[in-house]
Image (tube, grey):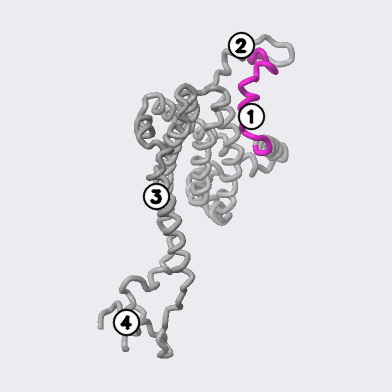
């Protein structure tokens, strides 16, 4: 008798028989049929025009739009992460004024659509024709510039995406900081560490394990809804595709190309997220699953004397 044919035996001598789940097999068959049907439809339907899709997949205009999307996502995410960290610390401050200011920021930017914010930033010159700074209350102006010159489509896109994303990241970072036991900070203070060193060396590294998964989801979401900047004529991936099919009328093939590139980038980000989670989870993994029998390891369930 091989090890794979041995059934687990409990301490009282009863043989453990796995529970039969016929509906699991039915669900698997139905899911397989749906997947096969969709795949066949994709491959056999001539309206998809896969030859045209292949022709546009590495088109320079598409690749330029993809590069713009990546730049926009990276720059906006870096600014949002830095500002979100500041907002999280402000929300945890002992000062009611500082907490209130951060709360108003989060309320304002989470409560309004990012598309509306983008349009407002792009048309900021209507409200503020000139931007500058100087000595307040009648003092001289040290620097000023025309708002239309400063607020380009790039600037408006980065401001709209980064400031909106910072409100969400601020709450994510705050929840991660709160998840760290207060005893960690008390122990660091007992060792003579200051508040800044305690936060940087003790609290934040432990909070990252809680922060990274939702923050990674926000980064993926930012990559996808960066497509809304097409309303201000910034030539990112979607807008580049729109410019192509507006002239060629090959709408569906070009949109499929856009979707393919979004899927590729999101898949890469998902893989990086999983690797980062495993790295941050070192020392926190549970070994309880090591005793679960799977694939020929039933023998470890047997008592040594049997």
Q: Which mark is residue 6?
A: 4
Residue 80 lies in what quarter of the image? top right
Residue situated furthest top in the rendering: 140
Quarter of the rendering occupied by the N terminus: bottom left
The answer to whether marks 2 and 1 mark residues whose Cβ atoms lie closer than 8 Å is no
Q: Is residue 117 positioned above or below 85 on the image?
A: above
Please state the horizontal and vertical placement of residue 69, each as a whole percent of the image.
Answer: 46, 30
The answer to whether marks 3 and 1 mark residues whose Cβ atoms lie closer than 8 Å is no
Pointer 3: what residue? 40
Residue at 56%, 39% (x, y): give it: 85
Magenta part, dominant SS: helix
Q: Considering depth in this image, is 180 or 162 the residue closer to the camera? A: 162
Q: Residues within 10 Å of mark 3 (few under 14, many from 20)?
A: few
Secondary-structure class at tag 4: loop
Q: Which mark is residue 117?
A: 1
The answer to whether marks 4 and 2 mark residues whose Cβ atoms lie closer than 8 Å is no
Q: Nearer the viewer, mark 3 or mark 1?
A: 3
Q: Is residue 242 positioned above or below 92 on the image?
A: above
Quarter of the rendering occupied by the C terminus: bottom left
Pointer 2: what residue? 146
Please state the horizontal and vertical placement of residue 103, each as a whole percent of the image.
Answer: 69, 39
């Amino acid at each position: 008798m091989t090890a794979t044919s041995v059934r687990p035996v409990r301490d009282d001598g009863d043989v453990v028989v796995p529970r039969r789940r016929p509906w699991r097999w039915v669900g698997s068959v139905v899911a397989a049929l749906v997947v096969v049907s969709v795949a066949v439809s994709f491959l056999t339907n001539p309206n998809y025009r896969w030859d045209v899709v292949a022709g546009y997949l590495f088109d320079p205009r598409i690749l330029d739009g993809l590069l713009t999307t990546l730049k926009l996502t990276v720059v906006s995410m870096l600014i949002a992460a830095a500002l979100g960290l500041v907002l999280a610390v402000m929300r945890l401050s002992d000062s009611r004024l500082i907490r209130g200011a951060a709360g108003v920021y989060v309320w304002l930017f989470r409560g309004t659509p990012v598309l509306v914010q983008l349009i407002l930033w792009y048309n900021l010159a209507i409200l503020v024709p000139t931007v500058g700074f100087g000595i307040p209350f009648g003092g001289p102006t040290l620097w000023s510039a025309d708002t239309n010159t400063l607020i380009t489509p790039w600037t408006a896109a980065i401001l709209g995406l980064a400031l909106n994303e910072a409100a969400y990241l601020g709450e994510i970072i705050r929840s991660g900081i709160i998840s760290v036991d207060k005893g960690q900070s008390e122990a660091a203070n007992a060792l003579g560490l200051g508040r800044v060193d305690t936060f940087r060396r003790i609290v934040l590294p432990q909070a990252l394990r809680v922060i990274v998964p939702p923050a990674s989801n926000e980064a993926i979401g930012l990559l996808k809804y960066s497509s809304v900047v097409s309303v201000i004529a910034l030539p990112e991936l979607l807008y580049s595709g729109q410019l192509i099919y507006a002239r060629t009328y090959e709408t569906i093939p070009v949109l499929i190309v856009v979707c393919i590139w979004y899927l590729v980038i999101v898949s890469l980000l998902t893989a990086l997220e999983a690797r980062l989670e495993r790295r941050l989870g070192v020392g926190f993994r549970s070994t309880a699953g090591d005793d679960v029998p799977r694939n020929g390891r039933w023998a470890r369930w047997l008592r040594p004397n049997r």
